Image (spheres, rainbow, N blue to C red):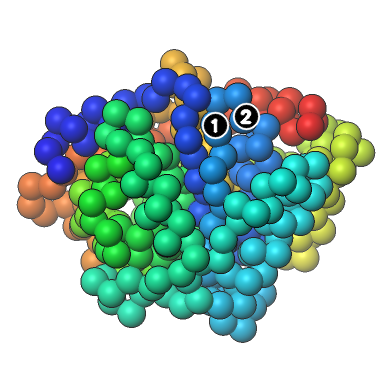
Amino acid sequence: MEEHQRLQMLQYPRHPVDVVLDTDTFNEVDDQFALAYLLCNQEKLRLQAIYAAPFFNEKVDSPKAGMEKSYEEILNILTLAGVPEYKKQVFRGADHFLRNRKTPVESEATRDLIRRARLHSKDHPLYVIGIAAATNLASAILLDPSIQERIVVIWLGGSGFHCSEMKEFNLMEDIPATQALFNSGVPLVMVPCWGVVEHFSISKPELEAYLKGQNPLADYLASYAIASVEEWAETPMWTKAIWDVAAVAWLLNDNQRFMKEQMIPCPKVTDQGAYDFIGERHLIQYVYRIERDPLMTDLIRKITKI
């Protein structure tokens, strides 16, 4: 893809836009907030499909189990949000991570993403929000590289380039997928976790005051977050980063009210999950600051009105 075309596609979009979401929803508590926020902004973000992504941690015994649990949690959120009609647009993703950066994992999700991407163009792209390991996204691009000219990927993962903490979950879960995504040349918005989005956090008093009891979805989000965090919180005065909301918010970031960004050369990702800035590379949008209070205000206001 020519550089001027890529840069044009990375400009702030005119609404409404078509969107798909790739999410490891059962992994933590923040994917649920991100999906809820997306559902609350349907006048601007036309949700086309939701893809269950694999993950592997202490909650599950395999990436496949993580994907299946995420699939079930997506359906749960859609029920609580009162939009069961979206359930037919939920697709299972990969049942394992990439073996290497060149070999994709085919799934319902990759087939659907390719099909939907082919219905779009560089002038009217499909916006792909990734808030999990890049397995499904990279696989779709590897299976059909031509879709790069029809999609924009907003991926939440990795650390800020200034940050010493490099072992971020979404990146480290599937390093070959991140390498494939960053090497593909697809129009990419990188929303880093450590050092950037980690500042978008919410406290127990805020969850209780603003969300509990407001509606079935808001009550579930608050109760689930509180119960999950208190299993590991070391002090009674805790806050919890709800990272994934920021990826959705990029598409609502008119006048940069929610975050600040800049164009930078796309780094390579090493086999250890570090960044390599050596060599001339294509440009990507890089989010370097989150405006916590305006975004949190909008998130809570939207969710409590469902």
Whether residue 29 is visible here, answered yes or no, is no
Q: Where is residue 43 in the image (x, y as percent from the top left)?
A: 60, 24
The vertical placement of 32 against 53, above or below, is above
Q: Which image quadrant: the N terminus?
A: top left
Identify the residue shown where x is 40% and y is 53%: 115
Query: Is 260 placed left or right of 1 in the picture?
Result: right
Residue underneath mark 1: 45
Q: What element carries label 2?
A: loop
Residue 215 image position (x, y, % from top left): 87, 37
Mark 2 lies on residue: 41
Q: Position of residue 152 (x, y in %)?
A: 35, 41
Left or right of 97 in this view: 91: right
**Given the image, on which type of amino acid does mark 1 rest?**
Leu
Residue 285 in which image quadrant? top left
Q: From the viewer's perspective, is residue 64 above or below residue 134? A: below
Tell me, yes or no, whether the two marked residues, 1 and 2, touch with CB atoms within 8 Å. Answer: yes
Q: Residue 163 carries which label?
A: none
Please indicate, yes or no, whether residue 295 appears anywhere in the rendered image: yes
> Which structural element holds mark 1?
strand
**C-alpha span from label 1 to label 2:** 6 Å
Write the residue at 47% across / 22% down. 15
**Circle 2: residue type:** Asn
